[in-house]
Amino acid sequence: MKTLRLYKREKLCSLTAIERLFVPGNATGTVMAYPWRAVWCVRKDGDRRPQVTQFVISVPKRRLRHAVDRVRMRRLMREAYRLNREYAGEDTPPVDIAFIYVAPKLTDYKSAEHSVRKILTRINRYFSPQQAEPTEQTAPEV
């Protein structure tokens, strides 16, 4: 059985790695799925950190003025990520993801979960080979 625990190694704590995400031109991509925006980049080969996808959550004080609201949104997002991280895919290389809250008011868990699924699916789609368009099948020549 697969464990649903959120391990410490999955949390992005390195200040240099977080700064690397926000340096202009350094991020691999950015994904918007309201009420969250994600900035992500592929980890370098020589990095000593664990070879798993790591994430950080940011809820700006400008968006939610009360600390209890910011903490609530971080908890909702953490829970949504914990339960839906399989949408990132097993074959994707380790990436660093920063989830940034952009809505001006509190939102519910359902919207956070939908955003996480959408963001992780788009990141996974970046690494998956493009599917060829189906072509018409003709009868084989004998």
Image (cartoon, grey):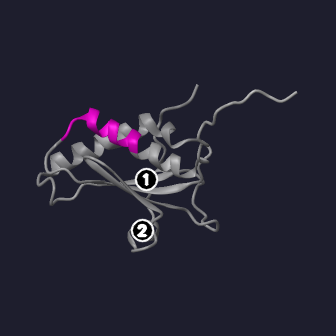
Give the magenta part as a residue range: 107-118
Residue located farthest toward the right when viewing the structure as drawn: 142
Residue 56 x/y as whole percent = 38, 55
Q: Residue 58: which quarter of the image? A: bottom left
Residue 32 x/y as whole percent = 33, 52
From what the image shows, is residue 21 above or below residue 70?
A: below
Q: Report the Cα–Cα distance between label 1 and label 2.
A: 12 Å
| Among numbered discs 1 and 2, the one appearing first in the sequence | 2
Residue at left offset 11%, top offset 55%: 65
As helix, strand or loop, the secondary structure at mark 1 comes to: strand
Q: Main secondary structure of the magenta part?
A: helix
Residue at left offset 48%, top offset 33%: 4
The mark found on residue 15 in the picture is 2
**In magenta stretch: residue 125:** no
Closer to us: 58 or 34: 34
Closer to us: 2 or 91: 91
**In magenta stretch: residue 117:** yes
The mark found on residue 55 in the picture is 1
Residue 142 x/y as whole percent = 88, 27
Horizontally, residue 77 falls left or right of residue 119, namely left
Residue 16 x/y as whole percent = 45, 71
Residue at left offset 51%, top offset 43%: 88
